[in-house]
Image: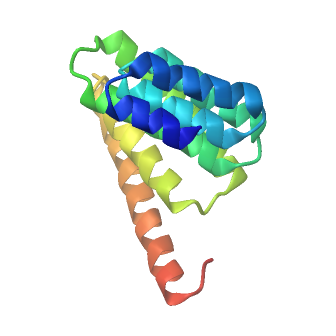
Amino acid sequence: YFILAKIHEDAGEYDKAEATLLKAKEARPNDPLVFLQLGGFYNRQEEFGKTMEALNQRAVIEPNNPEAFYTIANYYWDKAYRDFRLKEPEKKDYVAKGRVAIDKALQLKPDYIDAIVYKGLLIRVELTFEKDPAKQAAMLKEADRLQAEAKELQKKKLSGVVK
C-alpha cells in the first residue's frame, strides 16, 4: 500500500494516493505505521488537521510509545515555528498542544533526548508570545536548562552510560 501510494503521490495523483492509504487503514486499522504514513501524506498536502488526526490516532493505538507523542509535538512545533501565515492564537494553540504531547512522551521516557530538545524548542516559540520580561527570563532559563540536559544525556549515551 505504501509504495503504491507513494507512486501515485509522486505522479501527482493525490486522490489515488489518499485512497490507497485509506485502503491500508481498512486492511490494518490497528497498525500505527498506517497512521504515520497517512499523517506524512496529509502534511505534504498541507492538510494539517488531517495530519494531526492521523498522528493522534497512532498515539491512541500506541499509548505507551513515547515516539508517537514526540512526533505529534514535532509536527505542532514545526507548524507553529515555520508557518508565518498563522495568527498568534493558532500558534499559541499549537504550542500548547505540542507541550501536552511532549510532556506525555517525557512521562513515558524521561531520558528521551529528542523530546527534551523539542520541549525546549516549544518553550522558545511560546516565549515569543510572552510580554512579561520576568516570565520571559524564566522561560528562557527553562529552555536553556533543557538544552543542557539534552547535551548531557547525549554525552552519556555516546559514552555508553545511557542506552
Tell me which corner region of the image, top left, top right, bottom left or bottom right, holds residue 24: top right
Q: Quick check: 155 above or below 57? A: below
Q: Residue at x 52, y 30 (%)?
A: 39
Work out whether residue 135 or residue 66 is closer to the camera in this orientation and state it. Answer: 66
Q: Quick check: 39 above or below 160? A: above
Work out whether residue 29 or residue 13 is closer to the camera in this orientation and state it. Answer: 13
Work out whether residue 120 or residue 158 is closer to the camera in this orientation and state it. Answer: 158
Tell me which corner region of the image, top left, top right, bottom left or bottom right, holds residue 53: top right
| Residue 142 place in picture, x, y as percent | 42, 48
Q: Residue at x 67, y 34 (%)?
A: 58
Instruction: In the displayed orientation, state which residue is furthest to the bottom.
Output: 159
Q: Residue at x 67, y 57 (%)?
A: 109
Tell me which corner region of the image, top left, top right, bottom left or bottom right, holds residue 160: bottom right
Quadrant including the N terminus: top right
Instruction: In the displayed orientation, state which residue is furthest to the left.
Output: 84
| Residue 145 place in picture, x, y as percent | 42, 57
| Residue 57 place in picture, x, y as percent | 68, 28
| Residue 45 place in picture, x, y as percent | 37, 22
Classify residue 84 as left or right of residue 93: left
The answer to whether residue 76 is seen in the rendering is no
Classify residue 68 as left or right of residue 26: left
Work out whether residue 68 or residue 97 is closer to the camera in this orientation and state it. Answer: 68
The answer to whether residue 113 is seen in the rendering is yes
Q: Residue at x 75, y 31 (%)?
A: 27
Quadrant including the C terminus: bottom right
Classify residue 71 as left or right of residue 76: right
* Number of marks: 0
